[in-house]
Amino acid sequence: SDNVIEAKNIVVKFYIRRGLRRIGFAAVDNVSIAVPKGSIFGLIGESGSGKTTLGKVTLALIKPTKGEVLFQGRNIFDMDKKEFKKYRVNAQYIPQDPYASINPYKRVRDILTDIAKYHKLALNNKEALDMAIDIMNKVGLNPPERYLDKYPFQLSGGERQRVSIARALMLKPAYIVADEPVTMLDASLKASIVKTIKDMVREIGSSLLFITHEITLLQFFGPSTLVAVMYLGKLVEQATLKELLEEPLHPYTQALISAIPVPDPKARETRKLILSGTTPSPLNKPQGCPLSNRCPFAMDICRKEEPQLKQVSPTHFVACHLR
Ligand code: SF4
């Protein structure tokens, strides 16, 4: 297969308690994505769109209610222990909050060397430390000696995220999920951290699922990057970044793009699209199209029938009754 990860028809149901009632809703509702080998795949959506849940499903951190995930062609939930262990090394997570992946009571040195030793990628301390220093140099923790003996709380937010990135890269994984990796950081730092992730992924030849609510961050990955747009648990559009920016077909994507600040106010005038109201809770999804209660183009059919994904170019798919 040409894909490192294929998630097929994923459904993830969550349940909450309301008084005596248990209410279920699909956080991810029949979504399929494929991350091609050696490339970067963008997954965009606001909070509650299901993008993080889908990312975690591909890492086996959440078991889907339905659907399957193939890693290099093999179903991750069918693997035997040995194979699953290998997959665990090969599929790494860079979370939004670095404290979710790094131990606050360990020094940077141990955070990085322990993982290499644990997975037997380094035979001794010296080898593990050499690996750590090499990765630290590459992710911008220079000089490494300055950081090795520090604890995470002694670092800045940006440095801490670089440690989290270094930790994920120590194992040279085939697949990385970066989940809003710069959301908690200052605007001035975002570009440099996203570039670090991009350069490292290229260098070790991994594939990256980059999850974000900021479409502008995807521009660092180039116009041919594949991007999937999620809204209320559904995949509503998928295309290359260039196609999405130049010819967004789903009204939700159009609204996302028209919210990007542009230097020329006239250019903006022509493409401005504003949705009414705010995103409903996933517990109160409208019937039919998930956008039907906010979309300025909604028709009767939109409130009755859910639009299916349609292919409009070799790389462009959209789920909207207008197309
Ligand atoms: Fe709007 Fe209808 Fe398209 Fe949904 S299917 S985005 S409601 S036009």
Image (tube, grey):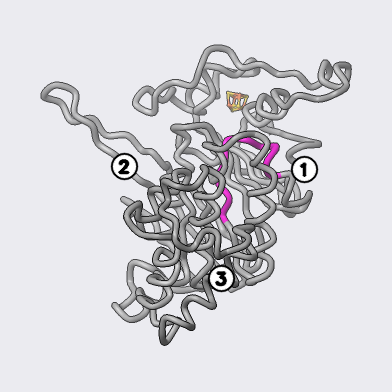
- Residue ID at (50%, 56%): 163
Name the side, left or right, on which 212 lies relative to 12: right
Please report contact status of discs 2 and 3: CB closer than 8 Å, yes or no: no
Q: Nearer the viewer, residue 299 or 104?
A: 104
Secondary structure of residue under mark 2: strand
Q: Which residue is mark 1?
A: 243
Name the side, left or right, on which 50 lies relative to 253: left
Mark 2 to mark 3 CA distance (whole Å): 42 Å
Q: Quadrant of the C terminus?
A: top right
**Circle 3 or circle 1, nearest the eye:** 3
- Which residue type carries mark 2? Lys
Q: Which residue is mark 2?
A: 13
The answer, for residue 73, to whether it is visible in the render is yes
Give residue 103's position: percent from left, percent from top.
35, 55
Secondary structure of residue under mark 1: helix
- Residue ID at (50%, 49%): 160
Please report contact status of discs 3 and 1: CB closer than 8 Å, yes or no: no
